[in-house]
Amino acid sequence: MKAMIKVLLVLVALGGAVFALAGTANAADVKVQIVAPKEAVVGRPVDIQATLHLAGDSSALAGVPVTLYTEASFGDVTGDIELAKAMTDANGVAVLSYEPRSAGDHQIRVEYLAPGASAPEVATASISVAGSTQQLYRSTAGVQIPGLNVWLLMAVLAGVWAILLSIALRVIAIARAGADVGALLPRGASRQMGGDDASQLDTTRKGVTHK
Amino acid sequence: MEALARHSSEPRAGRSFDAGEEPSSDPQERLIRTALAPVTGTSLAYYLWVAFLLMVIAWGAYAYSRQLRDGLVVTGMRDRISWGLYITTFVFFIGISHAGTLISAILRVSQARWRTPVTRMAEFITAVALICGAMFVIIDMGRPDRVQNIILYGRWQSPIVWDVLAITTYLTASIAYLFLPMIPDLALFRDRLRGRAPAWRTRLYDLLSVRWQGTNSQWRSMGAAITTAMILIIPIAVSVHTVVSWIFAMTLREPWNSTIFGAFFVAGAIFSGIAMLIIVMAILRKVYHLEEYITEKHFLYLGYLMAALALIMMYGNVSEYATTGYKMSGETQFHFRQLFLEQFAGFYWFYFVGGLVVPGLLVLLPWTRNIWGVVVAAVLVVAAMWVERYFIVVAGFRVPLMPYKPSVYAPSWVEISVVAAGFALFALLITLFVKIFPIIAVWEVAEDLENAEITLAAERLAPDPAGGGR
């Protein structure tokens, strides 16, 4: 009799445990529905909807973080790139905006952490992206300061080169002045050399004349 | 100048300036002979030196031909660290080019008379360093034919295009600034060496002396041109190294995110430029016996400037790293670790201690405050500044932009050979310049000597303050 009572108690305890565990939501209890456009175009954002419901009563799971990933390679590194992140609303819907950067068939992966679950669950979908290789980068407007532009740079540059040109003209003036004096000197003589004829001319920077 | 013209007008028949001639007792004549000595006499050591440099350049040319044939894959540069020794050396040479600007232009503007014997060397260094530096950008491109793309497709908004514009303008202005004060000296060479030098050289002096006869109007034109050039070249020089720094600072990389990069680079450029000038001065002084004109005073004055700039560089280091380190983002943490403790720690601490602290002490401590002390300090500074450029470039690239394993850069034999050839070319061009052009600014030094004589005479004639007369 005692043994029967013990077995019954154990069965009751086990039954209680089973019921207790069944009351906690786990991944297997969540239904996920991913709505993604079948086709997308490079550079044009698309919305991907992930809807989360409890499997039992189909009630919406609100406030669950959902993350969208895709696999990509860069250099010799391959891994997941996080594309978007959103929370489910009162209807259990998370809207994830994603702008495809390359053409082809992409596998996307939605990750969510169901209430009470310790590890994230995963659902996948595929999306076909059309389009060719193109530059997608668009620079932002920035701060436009009036007058601070390429023309200012060109004006500064032109000013500098104009001054350099004036220096070149000075050198030409030196050569011309030398030619005028050279015409007065005998062939082969030089003012710098201080020949007889040259001695009638100014020779120093200070304008001292040797007579 | 009057005295110079008088001396240069003396009959030159049978006169020789070669080594072994009795030294003249006349200071002006001695000056002219000293200036002419490198041009008129060539020793065996000179030929051996040139042959050595040519061999290094030839080896570098072979290495470069391999790079042209096989592409940049023969270098240690890859996609993640895409700048290495070439860009390091480019930045280094552009920095060295500030030697001429500072010594010649700034000291000329401030009318520091002691500068006259060293200005020409400084201006040589500027022109040569710019040529060598610009060359390394083209080498780094891998395909030299693509230089035209900068002109054809370059965007005005790009710091690369600003850099090309700044360096081109600076090179033109530097050559003009080197040439202008050299005109009277070229005329002196033209007159003194006529019939004594090879025909090509006489023609060269004829051409470059632009018919200089020393007339008043020529002096006026030259004076005006020098004044314009010396004022113009200072902002150009500052802009050049600022723009070089912007190539880094305007790139999205954590170690280069600095607002003081421009000022820091300019200070570093002047710092290394002075150091290189001291080294070149010491070598040319020894080889061409310029002891009468380049004295200990010149080394010490330049040493003081170098010490002052060492302090500015230390301040720049502290200011930059303290601000970024205080905020300490993840990338900064990585950078600080590699710079101060790991891969680049040896480079960094050599730069800081060996290139900033020790040279400063060598110049400032009385026991080492002499020519040798200053020269050793200058050698340390030049080495340290090249190293600084290296870790700025390579360590900057090594910080990962994405979560991948940090790359390693090791220069290949091709890069080392080409860089060695670049330095050999720098030395060769200086060597050849000295062999063709006046090594010291003869007319400016002559004016100084004249002024010194006048001052001495005036002092003799001046009444004794005590009333006793002289």
Image (cartoon, grey):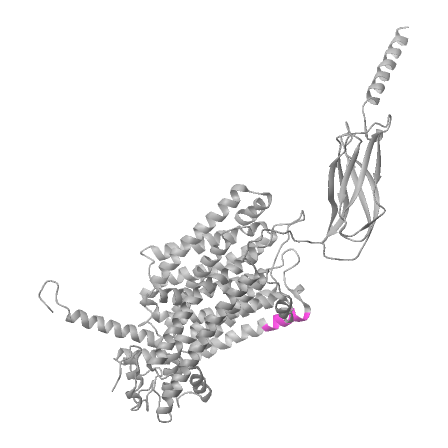
Do we see residue B41 in this rendering? no
In the rendered image, the quadrant that contains the C terminus of chain B is bottom left
Q: Residue furthest left?
A: B468
Q: Quadrant of residue B329?
A: top right
Q: Position of residue B39 (x, y in %)?
A: 40, 81
Query: Left of B392 or right of it: where is B458?
Result: left
Depth check, front residue: B348 or A55: A55
Q: Position of residue B64 (x, y in %)?
A: 61, 70
Q: Is residue B317 magenta?
A: no
The secondary structure that dominates the magenta segment is helix
Q: Quadrant of residue B58?
A: bottom right
Do we see residue B297 in this rendering? yes
Depth check, front residue: B406 or A63: A63
Q: Position of residue A144 (x, y in %)?
A: 58, 53
Q: Residue furthest bottom?
A: A186
Q: Residue furthest front?
A: A146
Q: Position of residue B138 (x, y in %)?
A: 59, 68
In the image, the segment drawn in magenta is B61-69
In the rendered image, the quadrant that contains the N terminus of chain B is bottom left
Looking at the image, residue B125 lies above or below residue A149: below
Looking at the image, residue B62 lies above or below residue B371: below
Q: Quadrant of residue A136?
A: bottom right
Residue depicted at 35% across the width and 91% down the height: A184
Query: Left of A155 or right of it: where is B42?
Result: left
Disc count in the image?
0
